[in-house]
Image: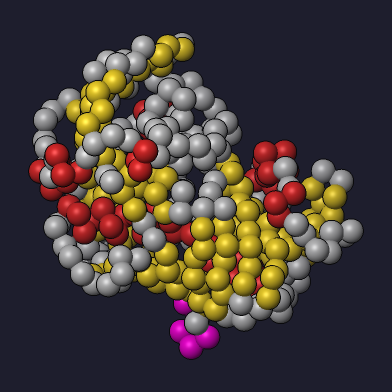
Amino acid sequence: MVAATSISLSLSAATRRSASSGTGSCCSSFPPLSRRPSNLRSTATALRKPNLRISASSMSIEASDAISPVSFLDRKESGFLHFVKYHGLGNDFILVDNRDSMEPKITPEQAVKLCDRNFGIGADGVIFAMLGINGTDYSMRIFNSDGSEPEMCGNGVRCFARFIAELDNLHGRHSFTIHTGAGLIVPEIQDDGKVRVDMGEPILKASDVPTKLPANKEHSVVKSELDVDGVTWNVTCVSMGNPHCVTFGGKGIQNLQVDELNLAEIGPKFEHHEMFPSRTNTEFVQVFSRSHLKMRVWERGAGATLACGTGACAVVVAAVLEGRAARRCTVDLPGGPLDIEWNEEDNRVYMTGPAEVVFYGSVPL
């Protein structure tokens, strides 16, 4: 069931949150849709904290047959931000139709407020669908839950593709060219509804990732030692248009059990390590076989998330470089599996996975 909801959420006051304090929470802001009655009318008490206010009186949640997604997305009332919330394996985003402007409809501070899981809608980021440039069909920009702007997001691209299909009322197999901060990305919606994305070639040159770790394999950093708070980890650095530090363990950590890690403690120490001048996403990986990997991720600007598409791509590239896996793998993430292939012929990485609507909403600006 897909729900349409009208939310009164004042965005007039700026949120004072530092760029390093994203929630990283993956809890849903609403009950699972399968447990909601088809017509639910609820009244909630206004929630308050300094510089942040939500008034959710007369919140309306209705079954998808009570409202047409197309008609909802056509709404153009001034003073309101209409959005659709999507998720890709639990990595959730607020999607905004921004094709009438090349400037985002909200500020990074407002995005922080919307992404707040206690006082806002709740999401890992806000994605803006814009008109294409340089011959592309569309452009994509993202604000993370901490207000920072990443180059690109793999799970976000899949959600973006499904959002575009809704906006243009497209059905069946379709592909798009998307301009991102990481360059050209080409997603293709499959017949089964999953999205296959050409993520481009991995960037391995240390200075381009970027990392200050010295290259130890041609121009790349592969299985290099990194001291993090007194613990020596072996890391491989990969960029998929955004920086990733991938580790399978280190000294005294031969068989990494990713479920036992305290990500909230160790993740920020990797993200803000001096060896990563642009900060970094970090993937901790457990190897089941040469075609089956398991990872947990600490995302730059978002914290611990249920899934990271570029991270899964970086994991397979790193596993191949370290001789741990074949070029096509199933990568298990907390939110579910992704199919990742690093094609040997064209050197490009392909990611296949789902993207689904959570609900439709409107927020007064």
Q: Quadrant of the C terminus?
A: top left
Q: Nearer the viewer, residue 259 or 320?
A: 259
* Left or right side of 220 for 337: left
Residue at left offset 42%, top offset 64%: 353
**Residue 95 % position (x, y):** 30, 44
Please identify the dominant SS of the magenta region: loop
Left or right placement of residue 59 versus residue 274 in this view: left
Residue at the location (23% across, 72% down)? 173
Where 91 falls versus 83 (above or below)?
Answer: below
Q: Quadrant of residue 32?
A: top left
- Against 114, is 96 above or below? below
Q: Nearer the viewer, residue 180 or 55?
A: 55
Which residue does the image show at 69% across and 70% down from the upper left?
288
**Residue 20 seen in the current view:** yes
Q: Is residue 204 visible?
A: no
Residue 51 position, x and y percent, is 42, 13
The x and y percentages for residue 127 are 34, 45
Number of on-image labels: 0
User: What's the magenta region?
Assistant: 344-348
Please say which color scheme the image uses.
secondary structure
On the image, the x and y values in percent for residue 316 come to 59, 71
Q: Residue at x 56, y 74 (%)?
A: 329
Name the quadrant containing residue 351.
bottom left
The residue closer to the viewer here, 161 or 136, is 161
Whether residue 36 is in magenta: the answer is: no
Residue found at the very far bottom of the displayed protein: 345
